[in-house]
Image (cartoon, grey):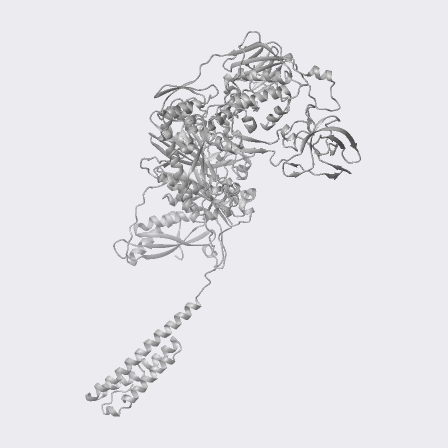
Amino acid sequence: MRVPLSWLREYVDLPATETGRDVQAKLVPAGLEVETVEQLGAGLKGPLVVGKVLTIEELTEFKKPIRFCTLDVGDANGTGEPQEVICGARNFAVGDKVVVVLPGAVLAGGFEISARKTYGRTSHGMICSSGELGMGDDGSGGIIVLPPEHEVGIDAIELLQLVDEVLDIAVTPDRGYALSMRGVARETAIAYGLSLRDPALLDVPAPNSYGHRVEIADPVGCDHFTARTVTGLDPEARSPIWLKRRLQKAGMRPISLAVDITNYVMLEIGQPLHAYDRNRVDGAIGVRRAEQGEELTTLDGVKRVLDAADLVITDDRGPIGLAGVMGGADTEIADGEIVAGPLSPSAAERAARGTTAVVIEAAHFDPISIARTARRHKLPSEASRRFERGVDPHAASAAAQRTVDLLVLLAGGSAEAGVTEVVAPFGPHTITMAADHPDRVAGLAYGRETVVRRLQEVGCDVQGQDELIVTVPSWRSDLREINDLAEEVIRLEGYENLPSTLPRPPAGRGLTERQRLHRRVGRALAGAGYVEVLSYPFVGEAQLDQLGLAADDDRRRAVKLVNPLADTEPEMRTTLLPGLFGALRRNDGRGSHDLALYETGLVFRPTGEEKVPARLPVDRRPSPEELATLDAALPRQPRRVAVVLAGAREQAGWWGAGRPTDWADAVQAARTVAAEAGVELTVEADQHAPWHPGRCAALYATVDGERTLVGHAGEVHPRVIKAYGLPERTCAMELELDLVERAGTGALRAPRISTFPVATQDVALVVDRDVPAADVERALGEGAGELLESVRLFDVFTGEQLGEGRKSLAYALRFRAGDRTLTVDEASAARDAAVALAAERTGAVLRGA
Amino acid sequence: MSAPNKSYDPVEVEALKPAEIERMRDEAVAAFAAAGDLEALAHAKTAHAGGTSPLSLANREIGALPPQAKAEAGKRVGQARGAVNKALAARQVELEAERDTRVLVEEAVDVTLPYDRVPAGARHPLTTLMERIADIFTAMGYAVADGPEVEAEWYNFDALNFVPDHPARQMQDTFFVQGPDGTSGDESGVVLRTHTSPVQARAMLDREPPVYVICPGRVYRTDELDATHTPVFHQVELLAVDEGLTMADLKGTLDHMVQELFGGEGMKTRLRPNFFPFTEPSAEMDMVCYVCRGESVGNPDRPCRTCGSEGWIELGGCGMVNPKVLVACGVDPEKYSGFAFGFGIERMLMFRHNVEDMRDMVEGDVRFTRPFGMEI
């Protein structure tokens, strides 16, 4: 809502010295968010005067037509002589009154006017357009042509009200009343402790039976309809400057007198109005729901197919307007004001098409119905914006009266005596509230007297002592509950005066185990050199194709968005890898090549069993069964962790060579994560997209007693690397963190530390190449028995001497007892047992044996 | 090696003459002094203090002396040997110190060499900022709560008093999720949560009051990414439901948070009336600019870039939990009241750490994230 300060002063006697910023400082604490205070005409300096065009000489030797004009500017130029001015616009004729800026003047933006040579003449000033004067678009497409009654030489700064301040207020959705001068003036009056001249306090004639007939078929959709008729309008009548200027300052474009008046009254009182050309309305005006598929061409020229839920205004032929949203083109009022052009109609034609009689509609419609219609037709209008947010149903008659008055005053019309009012009876809204309720909400004792006074200021009627019976004013449909009333009191008493106290919550438990784990995992990965990424979870089919997922891969079953930002990414991620790949590629492209990235976050896995939930109540706690239907509508959303790596894991430097990233780093990252949960992963070879089929590890943990696949790690498939444009040999890991968490074994039991000496035995075992080292190690561990302290693979060797398809695994076995120093024989026996079991399970042969 | 010769007169034995002993001693001491390094000293030691050194040989001669001469000769030789050993030890210490000094100099390295063998990792500053905020409140007794990001509309809107078709529902540009049968339109009853408030509703339904929770998390709105907007962002919301909670408690809790996060004297918040469906009364909350502390206002000589010389920085929204929300979540509004607030973490990161472009937070460029390390 744009509020010109000069207009606001019409309703509140603000001190003359109050600036827009002063008013802003008063309104913001009261909850009217004045976002900016625009200074119109800042720096503007005359002489800027009314001039009359005396002569026009067309200069044709230039690329575009130029006019050399002389103007009568009265004594404004000091001499009374004609003022010679060059002008490029053409929408004026000899005898027209225009706005002339003379040398010595300064226009907005510091544009200084002086006599200057141009187009071979000297131009002593400029004929102004509305744009040059900062007035906003007036639709003229050229310079301003004033009504003839203004005298030459008078100051146009004042005439056009060029200097003003405009408060731009972002009105919150609950406070529809503030979408009017009336509402803002009321808040201003309260803030200053001044009285308000309410523009809706008008003498309105009583309704009678000879007004334009109105039939309301849907009293729920329309609970109030006032119709008034004005005849004898002069189609040639124009909006006066003051009216146009107020509309412009409020951000609306002047269109024609009748339309300008309805807009003006809407801005003033907040009641949207519509004026129908009476000669185009056929029979009674009706309000009903549209028939499905019915059509209406709205004022914007768009033919719309209506929905059965749309509320429409009708005449005998059918819909003539989308109620509360936009009128129809068929009954549009027309005036004689036609932009000059080669096809200008004759005066007679103008009179024939001009509207001379209008029916004014001032109605009140159901906010929700209007909101739905505006949304359905993607047609937010000034009217719908107000109806959605709440319009004062009691202001309709006054607004209609105000419109009638202005049409009579400015268009020479006469008001018909008929006054139609169709009103569905309803009582005022009353709230019973303990007088100290605002005190208890605020934590500050205002006292009953203050509470009552503040409520009265906003327009409430207040009765009662300890228990207040508060009747809210018709324009405050947002005041429904006791806390709404408390807010009125507290905001008017000033949020800034609230004390600052701290509640005392009961003793807390800190973070949960799960929350601690999430933090630990992040720290552990960052400690291992990984940098966290938070990527968007939006993916598309192309990305899943690039991952090389099979057609029936589960990760292709995704949550789909109705309104994605990009049509190419309409789905929610089922894996963290696409986002990480994107970040990896972006970093690589920007010159960072040695990369280790991680991300933790939710993935979205539809079960296929989701059901659309019924709309649950909000006036009570839903039952557990009802709440269960909500969760049943949602996909699984497990938390995962993933890493990607590329380039060097260890950089080369003065210390020596670097080490490129490899698959084992990715597996190690999984172990790092699992270790934070106290989980030991077991690893198996696997083939799983998007990993390299020969370099992919499946990761298992024991979850709830079951050996469970919890993720994969390894080198990324070369085809995926190519498709994504990733660095060669990119490696990746992804784990379902929720599963790893569940695999956690709880508090660690401390190991027993023996202080007896260690006995070390090394063994080299030769096995077939495809025997997993993990199997050999497990067999050694089990075979060695409890004397074994640790087993560590320290070398893997392949060579001709081992034979084709064989490899040698060299292990260091460390034995130790808790109660004695082991003898060589004891250690050797344990080693032999270990080797024997490895031989039995994996076919291992002791090398050199 | 000669055998003892009992027939010699001790005085006559050349090696045991006092002058001879002194000469041996002096020669030894001189040889040690002359040794330039530990190796030379080792040679000198063999020559002058070893088993075949003149003094050792002289010592052996003592046994052959007549008893009356033994004591005197023994004393003389013993003293000489003592002096020699002392000189040896002193020189040994001297030369070792010299050697140590030299070796340590030779072993010196350039300690200014850079070392980035495994470059440091880092956590995302949005993550660590959310944790830092959560820590402030867990220290006060709050619990951290989380919930699904694909959320039922009932939790995201209805339970929070977003009336269907009320304009407030359009304030937040919502991503709608397709229904299970693939129907488009916004009929599935499922959305990407537009705020972390549904976690508050879940928290109230899950626990008996009093409820004190802080809900950090990721939320979604259909904004295009630019320097100041992102469709995927993070919020922290707080909810307190207890008997007798007031707006003053809300204000105090906010003051406490900005003091903890921005430190120092004079950090406080300001409330301005606003509208949110889930709170009533509602307020917009600002904090004093932590850089200029308000001193840039009306002071053109000292403009503040952080707050644009406004003196205040907009934080987010807050208010007293709307009793309708309490009812929908099974809390008796006659007995309990609550307050809540929420704000965007991206914005806070921007003004707390002078981030100029929102895109830096979403693109995952390691050059942006690395300097933030493990904590913020």
Establish if A699 lies above or below A434: below
Which corner quadrant holds the C terminus of chain A? bottom left
Establish if A671 lies above or below A385: below
Can residue B58 be seen? yes
Which residue reaches farthest top?
A209
Q: Position of residue A272 (x, y in %)?
A: 55, 20
Establish if A155 lies above or below A688: above
**In the picture provided, is B31 more to the left or to the right than A685?**
left
Quadrant in the rendering for residue A249: top right
Quadrant in the rendering for residue A633: top left
> Which residue is more in the foreground, A261 or A505?
A261
Q: Position of residue B179 (x, y in %)?
A: 49, 26
Q: Residue at x 27, y 88 (%)?
A: B18
Q: Position of residue A104 (x, y in %)?
A: 68, 38
> Which residue is more in the foreground, A150 or B317?
A150
> Which residue is more in the foreground, A822 or A19?
A19
Q: How many marks?
A: 0
Which corner quadrant holds the N terminus of chain A? top right
Establish if A812 lies above or below A30: below
Which residue reaches farthest left?
B67
Q: Residue at x 73, y 36 (%)?
A: A124
Q: Residue at x 34, y 24 (%)?
A: B334
Can residue A687 be seen? no
Q: Position of residue A378 (x, y in %)?
A: 57, 24
**In the picture provided, is A465 more to the left or to the right than A597?**
left
> Which residue is more in the foreground, A62 or B120?
A62
